[in-house]
Image (cartoon, rainbow, N blue to C red):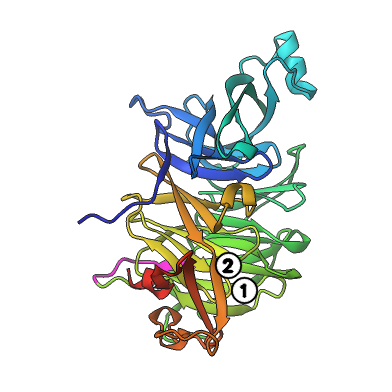
Amino acid sequence: MPPRRPPELYRAPFPLYALRIHREAGLALIAGGGGAAKTGITNGLHFLQLDWRDGKLSASLLHAHDTETRATMTMALAGNFIAAGQDATCHILRFQLFKSGQKTGGSSGDSAKTGAGDKDLRRRKAPVPNEKSNGNTHREMTEVAVETLHCVQTDTSPDTLQKAVCFSDDHTLMATGGVDGFLRVWEFPSMKKTLEFQAHNGEIEDIALGPDNKVVTVGRDFQCCVWQRDQMVTGLRWNENLPGIPDKTYRYQSCKFGAVEDQAKALRLYTVQIPYKRERRPLPCYITKWDGHSFLPLLTRPCGNEVISCLSVSETGTFLGLGTVTGSVAIFVAFSLQRLYYVREAHGIVVTAVAFLPETPELLKSNEAALLSVAVDSRCRLHQIACRRMFKAGVVDLNVGWESCPANMGSPTNSWLIQCSFSSQGVSPSGCCCSSVLG
């Protein structure tokens, strides 16, 4: 029997490669396409309105932005600004939401009035969700205006592909990386280039902007580096305390900063390591948690034999979301790096991006976390975790304790905890979260 797949929120008319969530507007932005090849597959950026209808989270198309012959492969958000990596360039877009008949402000409205920039300014109408009516909609219509502000070259290699883009937390800097291995840092929103140097011998896979404008880069050259401007602060070594793993058996694939729940000044960096070569007997992938200030390793744990393709951290730093090249999706507890949720072949093909929904009652309802995933199969799927409760082992009489749970993998850090999913009638059929691990 084929595996049961999570709910499908939306299906695009093109392969999906990028996903971002706009917290304030409750939007999911998904993008992709078929590129310049004349295959009949379009390219676009879709704005999805997230709201609850009939007791279920739904996503409705609010606006479809045509990206012409360019497929968006990477994307980052800074408020209402979008950085879209398309081929060897990064396009800076700005979108605005307003009611029908209401004029847009700033340069967007001026260009609409004079006729200038009409080619880059597109509007669509869609219903505005009524948050108080659990999914019912107003009769009022909303419009989306999308304006192209800048286009800068971010890769100079023959393959011409930007592979990573991110903003600093204060949205004053943007960093990009591509196949040519160069790290480029731009002032935002002026898009004045302030830094350009070769950070890796080969492709840059991922970038994370951290405190004090330190930049972490992941390359295909087995390196994960921390930079202060163009000076390398340190090179991370995830396997330093794992002598049984040779240096070039694995390469870094992703890096993301995350907050620490209830610790305002603390910061964590998460990296994913995947096998460099495919073996007849697949090697496990690993997640490593680092101190985000000192960049010292705190914890490393295996995360399964499927090759990881993407990583996301929830806004409170409580959960990690992973997608795999075989289409599976998993959610881990950031504190212990324990797998809490897993769906095998949720997409059946490579998962290209995952993103957590904002941790607000309007979107989560009774769930503790919700993760969206997109893939080359053009689908956007929803993964939800019901609220968990934590007890000391001596308080609750359960047959399975954390120390004997296969999910613990011998970690002593949380041996005193037991995590279970509860329903209104007690422990749900999932019981201990190790049932998710065991499938």
Quadrant of the drawing holding the C terminus: bottom left
Residue kind at label 1, given as amino acid type: Trp
The image position of residue 17, as x and y in percent, is: 46, 43
Within 10 Å of the Cα at label 2, are there few (<14), some (14-19), or many (20+) other Cα atoms? many
| Relative to 325, residue 61 above or below | above
Quadrant of the drawing holding the N terminus: bottom left
Q: Using residue 384 as the reference point, say whether residue 316 is left or right of it.
A: right
| Relative to 99, residue 187 above or below | below
Q: Using residue 383 as the reference point, say whether residue 262 is left or right of it.
A: right
Q: Residue at x 70, y 25 (%)?
A: 98
| Relative to 163, residue 50 above or below | above
- Residue 431 falls in which quadrant of the image? bottom left
Residue kind at label 2, given as amino acid type: Tyr
Label 2: element kind: strand
Q: Which residue is mark 1?
A: 290
Q: Residue furthest top?
A: 114
Q: Using residue 77 as the reference point, say whether residue 321 is left or right of it.
A: left
Name the N-terminal-most of marks 2 and 1.
2
Q: Residue at x 56, y 64 (%)?
A: 319
Circles 2 and 1: CB atoms closer than 8 Å: yes
Q: Is residue 279 magenta?
A: yes
Q: Is residue 221 magenta?
A: no
Q: Residue at x 42, y 28 (%)?
A: 36
Within 10 Å of the Cα at label 1, are there few (<14), some (14-19), or many (20+) other Cα atoms? many
Label 1: element kind: strand
Front-most of 64 and 269? Answer: 64
| Range of residues picked out in magenta | 272-280
Q: Residue at x 65, y 14 (%)?
A: 118
Q: Which residue is mark 2?
A: 270
Front-most of 230 and 260? Answer: 260
The image position of residue 362, as x and y in percent, is: 62, 47
